[in-house]
Image (tube, rainbow, N blue to C red):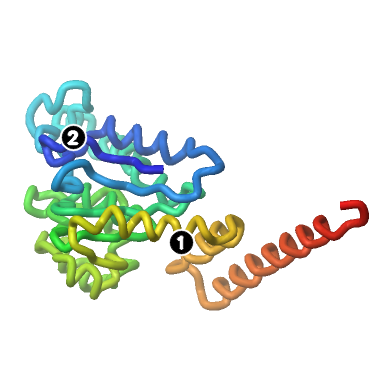
Amino acid sequence: MRVTLDAPTCRNAQVPTMWAEMERLATTLPPEIRVVVLTGEGPAFSAGLDRGMLTPGGVDGEPDLLGLTADGPEALADLIETFQHGFTAWRECPALVVAAVQGPAIGAGFQLALAADLRIVATDVRFAMAEVTLGLVPDLGGTHALTSLVGPSRALELCLTGRSIDAHEAVATGIASLAVEPDQLDATVDDLVAAVLGAPENTMREMLGLFRGIESRTAAEQQRTERGAQARILCAMTAAMRGRTRPGA
């Protein structure tokens, strides 16, 4: 399944209604969907938040962020929590989520890519946690995801400076798994998806469970997670073998 940001004329800038739709998609995936690919139409993955959201009156059909500041920080924080669900939902869905990222992935665009389990990037990728350039902080789950990949010191530096990360640095720091030429991105992602779908479904889903949340587990907790997963796989495998060899089968 592909989920494509499809507003190329504005470099796939994001708005809250888009985040609500992403949450809906992530939380209503059909059970047969094993892999989701997040992409952006056109030369940019996403330029981040639509800047119109930060102007008086905001964007038609979207929450008036500046107007809502009159309700105080707690009410605004509650609203932002609903925005965050469009990102965290991908980390909680049962499918493997792969971000295929080309060109700019700025601010909310970077945070959406970080919400995926894996990132395959084009050599023209440009990641940046650029909220600081607007006097803001990242608030869509990106700080935790980035820190788990690159460590707190580098994550802080990236968020404080808003500087760009190219494909080489993205791979070297573990933000991306692989960088390929732009014209090879789709084929490379298709090959990855094919390899994942070639594995037994229960193994793939157990593997996903092993690695999601691994940064918050102790070594002993991870070992317990591993042995539980392996035991379930072996029991299912044995049950299937018995089903194939039962008398009269």
Left or right of residue 102, residue 25 in this image? right
Q: Is residue 168 above or below residue 123?
A: below
Residue most toward the front?
Answer: 248
Q: Which one is in front, 237 or 230?
A: 237
Local crowd size for mark 1, using a 10 Å CA cut-off: few (<14), some (14–19), many (≥20) = few
Q: Earlier in the sequence, mark 2 or mark 1?
A: 2
Residue most toward the right?
Answer: 247
Left or right of residue 224, residue 9 in this image? left
Identity of the amino acid at label 1?
Ala
Residue most toward the top?
Answer: 61
Q: Which residue is mark 1?
A: 195
Identity of the amino acid at label 2?
Ala
Q: Position of residue 184 (x, y in %)?
A: 24, 58
Spatial CA distance of label 2 from label 1 is 30 Å
Q: Which residue is mark 2?
A: 7
Q: Position of residue 25 (x, y in %)?
A: 41, 36
Q: Which one is in front, 159 or 184?
A: 184
